[in-house]
Amino acid sequence: MFSKVPENNEGVLNLPRINFTVLSFFPIQGFLGTGATFAADLNLVVQIIMGTGLIVGWFLAKRQRYRAHGICQTSVLFLNLLMTGLVMWPSFQQQVKPALTKALHNRYYEAATIHAVFGTVAELLGLYIVVVAGTNVIPQSLRFKRWKLWMRAELVLWMIVLGMGFGTYYAWYIAPFR
Amino acid sequence: MTRKNVRITGLAALAMIATLTVVGFPNVKANDQPSEAATEVKIDNFVFGPQTITVPVGSTVTWINKDDIPHTTVSTDGVFKSKVLDTDEKFSFKFTKAGTFSYFCSVHPKMTGKVVVQ
């Protein structure tokens, strides 16, 4: 995407530059009435839908509709990967990564850093479960056998991460404007 | 100097102090109003300060992030755009045309400000 706006510390550069930030595809103003951007609001809504989807998927498994359960949980996992790439990672890279040294001294950075660490673990564990459950790529020695335990642990971890995500949203876009 | 002269001089001094006090205060108050010469906007506690600044054509306005949170300065109509400013980082832009330039922080779009160039 091209941006014709000068962007340097002196404000004098007028050359068009390629802006790879996917965040710039979205409008700026959010739609939930908080201090958030459109992308952050969209992400919040999608995350709530995904959290609900995972619980629906859990019920599907309980009713032994395993194929529907697999499709549901896998869709959530890949949708989250998309939202991470489109919204969360660019936002983290833009705001938190340059200030990681003070990450544990400020609630603004703390919330996002802890959410990012646990979120990465949840996403990787989810991918591992999907690969073990849906393919034969993983060698037998590295495959888990206690399906329920792993999947329930993933669901609980995901819900914790979701809660941390709400915490990050609150710390970034609600608390500063109260 | 006679005692009478001393009294007159004392009264004159008091009158002068009283006059300066009465006339001087409005001047101090006037200085508190947004100054046209002010060219620095501080970003602190999720607020641009002053929120509206008036400058003559040709002025360079500098935004300095005094917050411990990253912020940006982006013109609503695309005239200028800073990179993400960390604590104590600055962004300057020279206004060569008259007009009112609204801007916001693209990370926290509720933060807004205005530069009036006359």
Image: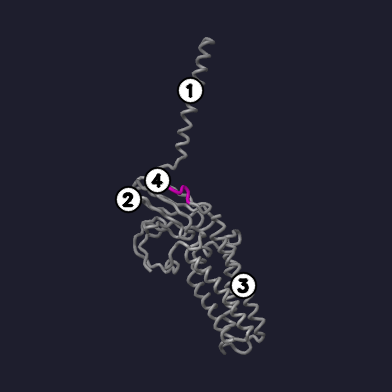
Spatial CA span between label 2 and label 3: 53 Å
What's the residue at 53%, 63% (across, down)?
Answer: A96
Q: Is residue B19 positioned above or below A77 on the image?
A: above
Which residue position holds label 4? B54
- Figure disc tally: 4
**Where the C terminus of chain B falls, by quadrant?**
top left
Residue interval drawn in magenta = B48-52
Give me the chain letter of mark 3.
A
Q: Is residue A58 magenta?
A: no
User: Mark 1: few, some, or many residues within 10 Å (few <14, many ≥20)?
Assistant: few
Q: Are marks 1 and 4 in contact (CB under 8 Å)?
A: no
Q: Looking at the rendered structure, which numbered label has been put on residue B86?
A: none
Q: Secondary structure at mark 3?
A: helix
Residue A133 image position (x, y, % from top left):
59, 86
Mark 1 and mark 2 lie on one chain; the one further toward the N terminus is: 1
Instruction: Residue under label 1, please give it.
Output: B16
Q: Nearer the viewer, mark 2 or mark 3?
A: 3
Q: What is the distance, in whole Å, between disc 4 and disc 3 at their CAs?
A: 50 Å
| Residue A10 image offset from top left, x and y in percent | 39, 55
Chain bearing tag 2 is: B
Amino acid found under the numbered disc labelled 3: Met
Q: Earlier in the sequence, mark 1 or mark 4?
A: 1
Amino acid type at mark 4: Thr
- Taking the spot 35% from the left edge, 64% from the top edge, the residue there is A16
Residue tagged 2: B97
- Tell me where residue B81 appears, x and y as whole percent: 40, 58
Kindly state the secondary structure of the residue where label 4 is placed: strand
Q: Cα distance, mark 3 to mark 1?
A: 74 Å
Residue under label 3 = A159
Query: How far is the residue under mark 1 from the one under mark 2?
Result: 46 Å
Indicate the chain on which mark 1 is placed: B
Q: Can you give x and y, in whole percent of width and height, for residue A40 in the image?
A: 50, 66
